[in-house]
Amino acid sequence: MALIELRDVTKSYKRDAIEIPVLERVSITVDAGDFLGLMGPSGSGKSTLLNLLAGIDRPSRGTVRIGDTEISSLSERALAAWRARHIGFIFQLYNLIPVLTAFENVELPLLLTSLSKKQRRDHVMTALGIVGLGDREKHYPRQLSGGQEQRVAIARAIVTDPTLLLADEPTGDLDAKSAGEVLTLLQRLNQEFKKTIVMVTHDPHAAERATHLLHLEKGTLVEQVGSRA
Amino acid sequence: MKFIGLVFKSARRSKRRTLLTVISVALAVFLFATLRSVLDGFDAVSAASSSTRIVTIRSTSMIFPMPTSHAEAIRSTPGIRDVTWANWFGGIYKDPKNFFGQFAIEPESYLRMYPEVILSPEDKKAFLEDRTGCIVGDGLAKKYAWKVGDRIVIQPGIPNYGSQDYPFTIRGIYKAGSSAIDNQSMLFHWKYVDERSDVKGQVGWYVAEVANPDQAAQVAMAIDQKFANSPYETKTDTEQQFSASFASMLGNLNLLLGSVALAVVLSTLFVAGNTMAMSVRERTTEIAVMRTLGFPASTVFLLVVGEGLAVSVIGGALGALLARLVINGEFLGLAGGFIPAFGVTNWNVVVGLGLSVLIGLLAALIPATMASRLKIVDALRRVA
């Protein structure tokens, strides 16, 4: 069953009077439960495609449908509420809030829900437990290693049990060992918790963990690398 | 409520910067509350002034005296019910720093015309019967730990009153029944001063009571006409006008103090606004991340405004509290008798706190708008 449907999506940016095309008529279908790897050189439009899926950017043309929702037509406010409910985003540079502890960082998306303090605590501890950092709840980001920071970021991404996990170069800033742990964690989330994941990566080793791969070049889908499932 | 922790954590991000902003707001509110209390002191005098009392001084200036013969001339003016007079003594108690108002009064008529000077019948009797007796306000008595029966010595500060010290016996401690009366003053017999003065029969000002307050202006004019073209021309005003003209000797206080307060508040507003703008600019990526997590623009706006308010209100509360504790009549003793000792009131504190809320809101307005309108993708790209 298709969870993501992009139809003829075109995205271009205006820089002064010049229009710069980033994506050209891209159409993708991703089934629920897939772990899709998006590869391509810098500037190929991978991150832009991820941003469109996350609802933090809008296509110039075409439609983006996630589940039953045509997100390209939602208002800003509705889109924010939709993101809070359906998207978990993992950044390359972790992007944890430095003045908040690991617990508070993971709790952040839950502040937008109607959960009680105790329920929030249970959710956060479950998420931290899944990423193996249940004992680091009181640590600040500066007290964690890069790999641990990224795992906290993953806990933050999964704490609301989102429909879709999006990862933008999640291992791009990590050493090989930490990168391996993060990829294993993502794979586990996909296989054990049936999370649909779209991951942008340059790294062929990271791409190997995906069940499907797509290759973008100059804004167009150039080859369907195929299923690894 | 669940966002309050987030607001305070954000405010503590740069502790030094936040502390400096808190201090600047605290100082602004402290100064504002203090200046406001000064203006309120003057306003209170005007508001509490009697509508039946009119005050006559020399037309040139109140520092020049008039002869006692004016008393009968004023008393005989149609519409006048009673007359009293007083002199500014300007003496020194131990040290020139111990400044307070000292007035030589005609005691019987003065106490009759100023029922706001509240004195027990026994104290009043003792004062009237003792030529070297004096009465002091309860604020002044507290300041110098004086009690009835104490003997105090005042050195004359104005050459006309001779060079000999003036010993006094405290015969009563009065309370001020309204803001028109200062509780930091000392009152004593005009005769006692007059008999030791180099120039006899000199009066600083007359106070007359009119039978009909509606005719106060006409009566005042009639008094001044009586002394027109004499060596001692007069200027008579209602007590309210007299208080106002005394205040105006210090310049346009409302404009002066108001301008100072406004300048301080505006500069603090710019400091706080700049701090908030810097804080938000440094957090561009974090705000973009929060928006990505699903925080609506309105929530981001409120979080930034909340941060501005928290910093400003903490500063405001500190400043207002400090002003309330430090600026009071007993501490300042600035009244000098013409104006009741002023102090920061609860209302001044409330207004100061309101001002800090306003500073917080205005300072955060532009940064909060910037944060809420942030384009997520652009903000993330700046760092990535």
Image (tube, helix red, strand yellow):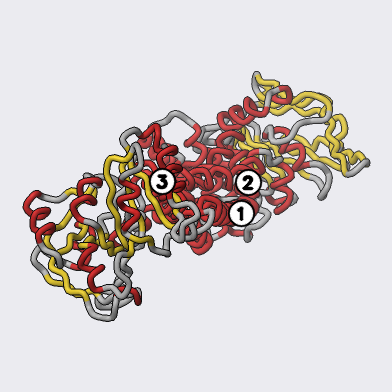
Identify the residue at image location x=62%, y=55%.
Answer: B274
The answer to whether dots 2 and 1 both sit on one chain is yes
Dot 2: few (<14), some (14–19), or many (≥20) neighbours within 10 Å?
Answer: many
The answer to whether dots 3 and 1 both sit on one chain is yes
Amino acid on which the number 1 mark rests in the picture: Phe
Q: Quadrant of residue B2?
A: top left
Residue B236 on image: x %, y %? 43, 48
Answer yes or no: is residue A200 visible. Answer: yes
Dot 3: few (<14), some (14–19), or many (≥20) neighbours within 10 Å?
Answer: many
User: Image quadrant for the N terminus of chain B?
Assistant: top left
Which of B152/A159 is in front?
Answer: B152
Residue at label 2? B367
Q: What count of labels does the image hold?
A: 3
Residue B223 is labelled as 3
| B362 left or right, relative to B82 | right
Amino acid on which the number 2 mark rests in the picture: Pro
Which of B95/B164 is in front?
Answer: B164
Dot in front, 3 or 2 = 3
Residue A106 on image: x %, y %? 49, 44
- Give the mark, 2 or 1, whose residue is nearer the N terminus: 1
B32 shown above or below A3? below
Residue B270 is labelled as 1
Identify the residue at image location x=67%, y=34%.
Answer: A54
